[in-house]
Amino acid sequence: MSNVVAALDIGSSKVCIIIAEMKNKQFNVLGVGTSECKGVKKGIIVDIDSTVEAINSALKQAEHMSNKKIKSVFVNIPGGYTNLYKTKGVIAVSRDDKEITKEDVNRVLEAAKVVAIPQDKEIIDIIPEQYIVDGYDEIRDPIGMVGVRLEVDANLIVASCTTVQNIIRSIQKAGLACDGIILEPLATSSVVLSDDEKELGVALIDVGAETTDISVFRKGSLIFTKVIPVGGNHITNDISIICKITSTDAEKIKRQYGVATSNLIRNNDIIKINSIGGKSEKEVYLKDIAEIMEARISEMLYLVRKELEDRNLYNSISAGVVITGGGLFNIKGIQDVAQSSFELPVRFGYPNYIGVANPIYSASAGTAFYALKEKRTSTVELSHSVPKKEEDSHFEDYVEDDSSSKRNILDKIKDFFADFF
Ligand SMILES: Nc1ncnc2c1ncn2[C@@H]1O[C@H](COP(=O)(O)OP(=O)(O)OP(=O)(O)O)[C@@H](O)[C@H]1O
Ligand SMILES: [Mg+2]
C-alpha cells in the first residue's frame, strides 16, 4: 500500500517542498522543489507575499518532478519559537475489564492539556514523556495494558498565535490547505537521529542560514529546544564586509575555499575577485578568509555549548552532538573543530534518502517522514497519470480529504492533533 504526503519547510534562505511516499515501509522521495525566499527572517515570516511566491515556485518544481498535483501540505514550525511546558494528566481507565485503549490515551493527553497558557499562545502539540499505570512508571505505550489509573507526564508545545497564523495564511494564500503543523526538531530528528542516540541523550544542532536550532533528546523524548540567531549567512556576511566584496561572491568563496580553521591554510595563496561595483579586481588571501571563518564558526559553536551548559544539559548528552542544516555543511575541517569545541563526539547528519541526501533537506524530508510515520494521509492527487489499480483506494482517500479541506483550517489542525496519538 502506498501513502503520499507533501511537506513544506519555510527556511530563512529557501522554501522547500518535498513530496514523498511510504511504500512497503520504504520512504521514497518523489519530488523536491526549492525556491529562494526573502520573506523570512531568522526563521519567522516577515513578508507573506514573498513567502507565498516562494511556496508557489517550490510547489511547481515538486509537482513537475513527481507528476502529482498537491492540494495540501504538512508544515514544520521551528522548535526555538515554541515553548515546552511540563504537564501531567490523570484519568480513570474506562473499560470494565480495565484494559487501556487508544481512547484512554487520548483522554489522558487531553487532560494534560488543561493548563493555563498565555492568551497570545496556542497549543500546537503534546509529547508524552512517560505513562504511569497504577504507579508503575516509564511506560512508553500503555495500550493493551491493564490498570485502573492512567497518568501521563508530557511536554506541551505552545507557539505564538501570530507565528502560527502567518504560516497558515501563507499556505492558504498559495492555494493550499494545511494538513498539520509538526515541530521541526521532531521532524528533523526522525531522519537524522537514531533511536539509540535519542535514548542515550543527544544534542541536535540544526545550523541554517540565519538561525541555529538547538534540541536535546533524552530517554527517547525531546526535552529542550531553543533557537539562537546565528547561521551560515553570518559567515558569508563577515567575508563580504571584511573583504569588501558582494555577498554573492562571498557565498561562492565560502563554498569553494571555506575552512573551519586557519591551520589548514599553510601558504599565501591569493584569489582574485571583482570588487563591489565590478570596476576593478581585488586580491584576497585564502588565509584571511580562513581566519574570518574560524572566528565566526568558533563563536557559533561556543554559543551552542554555552547554552547546553547553562541549561545543565551538557552532561546528559552521552551520545554527543549531531549537526545538520546547511550552515556548517561541507566546510573543510569542521568535524575536528566542532569535536574539540564540544569535547564530545560530533557527527554530521542528513536524510539518507535518494533525492534529499543533503543536510539542507533535513527539516523538509523529516517533516514528510514524520507525517508518514504517524500515518497521516494528505490531499495530494495524481495529476497527469491515471492511477494504477493498486493506487485506486488511496486516490479515493485524497478525494475525501479534499472535501474536508473546505472546512475551517483550525478545525482541521485540531483534528490532526486530536488523532495524533
Ligand atoms: N556547500 C556549502 N558550503 C557551505 N555553506 C553552505 C553550503 N550549502 C549551503 N550552505 C549554507 O547553508 C545555509 C542554508 O542552510 P539551510 O538551507 O539549512 O537554511 P534554512 O533552513 O533556509 O535557514 P534557517 O534554518 O536558518 O531558517 C546558508 O547560509 C548557506 O550559505
Ligand atoms: Mg532550516
Image: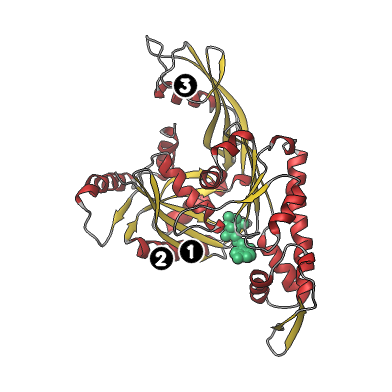
Which of the two discs, 3 and 2, sits closer to the camera?
A: 3
Residue at image location 58% in from the left, 27% down from the top: 115
**In the drawing, does residue 129 fall left or right of residue 179?**
right
- SS for dot 1: strand
- SS for dot 3: loop
Q: Position of residue 147 (x, y in %)?
A: 46, 12
Question: Which of the numbered marks, if any, corresponds to residue 61?
Answer: 2
- Categorize mark 1 by other alpha carbons within 10 Å: few (<14), some (14-19), many (20+): many
User: Where is the C terminus found, in terms of image quarters?
Assistant: top left
Q: Is mark 3 within 8 Å of ligand 2?
A: no
Residue at image location 56% in from the left, 13% down from the top: 135
- The answer to whether 161 is drawn above or below residue 13 in the figure is above
In terms of depth relative to the viewer, which is nearer, 412 or 14?
14
- The answer to whether 289 is drawn above or below residue 193 in the figure is below
- Determine which residue is flagged by label 1: 34
Residue 80 in sight in this render:
yes
- SS for dot 2: helix
Query: Are dots 2 and 1 in contact, CB under 8 Å?
Result: yes
Question: Which of the numbered marks, if any, corresponds to residue 273?
Answer: none
Question: Which of the numbered marks, if any, corresponds to residue 142?
Answer: 3
Circle nearer the N terminus (2, 1): 1
Circle nearer the N terminus (1, 3): 1
In terms of depth relative to the viewer, which is nearer, 251 or 265?
265
- The answer to whether 193 is drawn above or below residue 285 in the figure is above
Three-letter amino acid code at disc 3? Answer: Pro
Q: Distance between the residues labelled 3 and 2?
A: 43 Å
